[in-house]
């Protein structure tokens, strides 16, 4: 069986520090042609983005995709909301997590899977200050161990 090659286009590194990631999902994103080209160039930002679940489905908001320089003049709004392509079972899990447990849904990364652009989203719980300090401590200890101290 042929393997599909994955290549990261954008990452939200801050999310792993700010949130405790509980459950991961892979979703397709409904994009326009110029947005695809811009993402392939790595021109975007996931930092302030989040996912909203509505009756119509899941939408990613706050995802900034810089307009493609060589596209026509009718470039889409860089911050427009974009539909996430998830099945019913995944949408139900996300709705349940947000409604019952008070979790939030955040995008972790956007990547190329074969020729398709996918987004990895996660149900997440915000970390408290002491949790963030523990994360910093763990990171420093592992860094020291790698350096051989």
Image: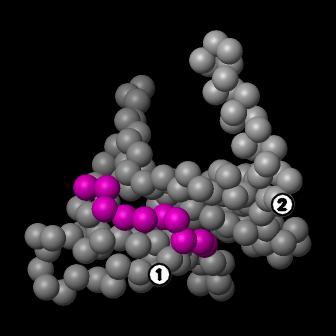
Q: Main secondary structure of the magenta part?
A: loop
Residue drawn 35% across and 79% down?
A: 78
User: Would you place residue 57 above or below residue 9 in this image?
Assistant: below
Please identify the quarter of the rendering in which residue 113 is found: top left
Give the magenta-colored segment's residue range: 41-51
Residue 149 lies, in percent from the top left, at 68, 15
Element under disc 1: loop
Q: Which residue is mark 1?
A: 81
Report the side of 101 relative to 108 (left or right): right
Q: Secondary structure at mark 2?
A: loop
Q: Quadrant of the N terminus?
A: top left
Viewer-side residue, 119 vs 46: 46
Q: Is residue 13 left or right of residue 19?
A: left
- At x 63% / y 78%, what residue is drawn? 52
Tell me which numbered mark, 1 or 2, is placed earlier along the sequence.
Answer: 1
Residue beneath the point at 15% across and 70% down: 69
Decide which of 106, 36 is in the foreground and name it: 106
Q: Which mark is residue 128?
A: 2
| Above or below, 136 relative to 123 | above
Q: Visible in this render: residue 88?
A: yes
- Percent x, y for residue 96? 81, 69
Classify residue 141 as left or right of residue 134. left
Percent position of residue 11, x then y = 48, 52
Residue found 42% across the figure and 50% down from its top: 111
């Amino acid at each position: 069986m042929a393997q599909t090659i994955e290549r990261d286009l954008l990452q939200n590194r801050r999310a792993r520090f700010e949130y405790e990631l509980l459950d991961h999902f892979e979703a397709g994103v409904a994009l326009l042609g110029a947005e695809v080209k811009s993402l392939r160039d790595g021109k975007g930002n996931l930092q302030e983005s989040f996912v909203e679940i509505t009756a119509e489905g899941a939408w990613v908001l706050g995802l900034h995709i810089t307009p493609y320089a060589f596209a026509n003049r009718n470039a889409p709004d860089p911050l427009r909301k974009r539909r996430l392509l998830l099945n019913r079972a995944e949408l139900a899990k996300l709705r349940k997590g947000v409604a019952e447990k008070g979790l939030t849904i955040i995008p972790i990364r956007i990547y190329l899977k074969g020729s398709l652009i996918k987004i990895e989203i996660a149900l997440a719980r915000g970390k408290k200050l002491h949790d963030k300090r523990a994360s910093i401590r763990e990171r420093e200890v592992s860094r020291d161990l790698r350096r051989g101290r």
